Amino acid sequence: MYDAVKNYYGKELQSSSDLKTTACCDFSSIPAWLKPLLSNIHDEVLSRYYGCGLVCPTDLKGKRILDLGSGSGRDVYALAQLVGETGEVVGVDMTEEQLEVANRHIEYHREKFGYSHGNVTFLQGYIERLDELGLEKNSFDVIVSNCVVNLSPDKDAVMRQAYELLKPGGEFYFSDVYSDRRIAPQVASDPVLYGECLGGAMYWNDFLRIATQNGFTDPRLVEDRPLDITDERLSQLVGQTRFYSATYRLFKLADLETACEDYGQAVIYRGTSENQAHGFLLDKHHFMETGKVFPVCGNTFRMLQHTRFKEHFQFIGDFSKHYGIFEGCGSSMPFEQEISSAKLGACC
């Protein structure tokens, strides 16, 4: 599959318009604050973008970021503007053609951003073999990935090594493709379906298990949308299996529990996180309005208090008394299940 993926992304696909699903984001649905950053990126880099979501979390100034499967470098160059000249972004990809595009424009972007020195590096390698690249463990504040983990034949290794490379309190923030059931053999073995990020998509519940087993307790779904397969042959081949583009955030926090437990805690968002003056979006079920007391479970309390978000919140309560399970903690499939004309153009 390594050769098939390299050929698909290095030779068969020449631009995002060659894709056969609605995985790629529509520019019109991108947040207003991100559009100026993308407009600074070279056209050739943008044209070779094959992601399925937005992997630009907030509060990255001065941080060290790792992009798994960085491709032509679109997300790396967007993140380079968010971390600023004091930060650093490292991109890892296995496809020579994509890396050649990314490296060709390093100096262009340094000048465009007005930096005195470059703050990006691209490495050729495999995302399930990061230990071969000489990257220091516990050294990254945030790891991102955009529609690439599904392409890996060893997703367990990706999760394990991402956890090892993150600092305590760090975050794996990534978009990918998931399915509502385990993939049939004829789907998994089709080279086009695999290249289109469908053949290697994880059943959503298997993903949650793998993430938890590798230390990422309590994965949080940020956004999701159903994917439409626009190619008739591929649509017939996948049958009734449904696919979703989804963005998750996984925190490296040792004390997280496997369920949402109630300790009578709450937080108040100060309105100070960048681009989030009116409210803070932690995940799909936690949007905290500025200045409002917001009850939270113990895990959410820790995700805010022991990460880079701490300065933006006032914390109420502790862990001295337990009140049972936090109301509303469910276990059904988390994704939206209906495809509508409005959803097709939306970006995860």
Image (cartoon, rainbow, N blue to C red):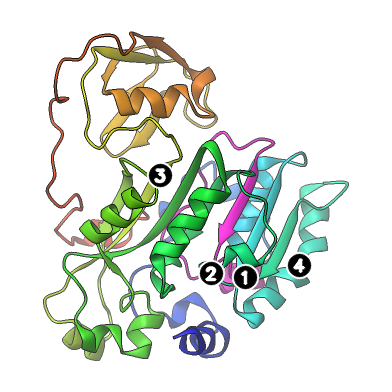
Asked if 206 appears above or below 315 in the picture, the reply is below
- Residue at x 19% of width, y 71% of height: 182
Q: Circle 4 sits on which residue?
A: 105
The CA distance from mark 1 to mark 2 is: 7 Å
Point out the tag, 4 or 1, that comes first from the N-terminus.
1
Residue 23 x, y percent position in the rendering: 36, 68
The CA distance from mark 3 to mark 1 is: 25 Å
- Residue at x 23% of width, y 10% of height: 321
Name which residue type carries label 2.
Answer: Tyr
Name which residue type carries label 3.
Answer: Leu
Asked if 241 appears above or below 288 in the picture, the reply is below
Residues in magenta, as a range:
43-71
Horizontally, residue 13 falls left or right of residue 264, namely right
Q: Secondary structure at mark 2?
A: loop
Kindly check if marks 3 and 4 are in contact, taking CB atoms under 8 A apart as contact: no
Point out the tag, 1 or 2, that comes first from the N-terminus.
2
Q: Is residue 337 magenta?
A: no
> How crowded is the residue under tag 3: few (<14 C-alpha within 10 Å), some, or many (20+)?
many
Point out the tag, 4 or 2, that comes first from the N-terminus.
2
Q: Is residue 68 magenta?
A: yes
Name which residue type carries label 4.
Answer: His
- Residue at x 33% of width, y 27% of height: 300
Name which residue type carries label 1.
Answer: Ser
Of tags 2 and 3, which is closer to the observer?
3
Q: Circle 1 sits on which residue?
A: 72
Residue 151 x, y percent position in the rendering: 42, 74
> How crowded is the residue under tag 1: few (<14 C-alpha within 10 Å), some, or many (20+)?
many
- Residue at x 21% of width, y 34% of height: 259
Image quarter for residue 297?
top left
Kindly check if marks 1 and 2 are in contact, taking CB atoms under 8 A apart as contact: yes
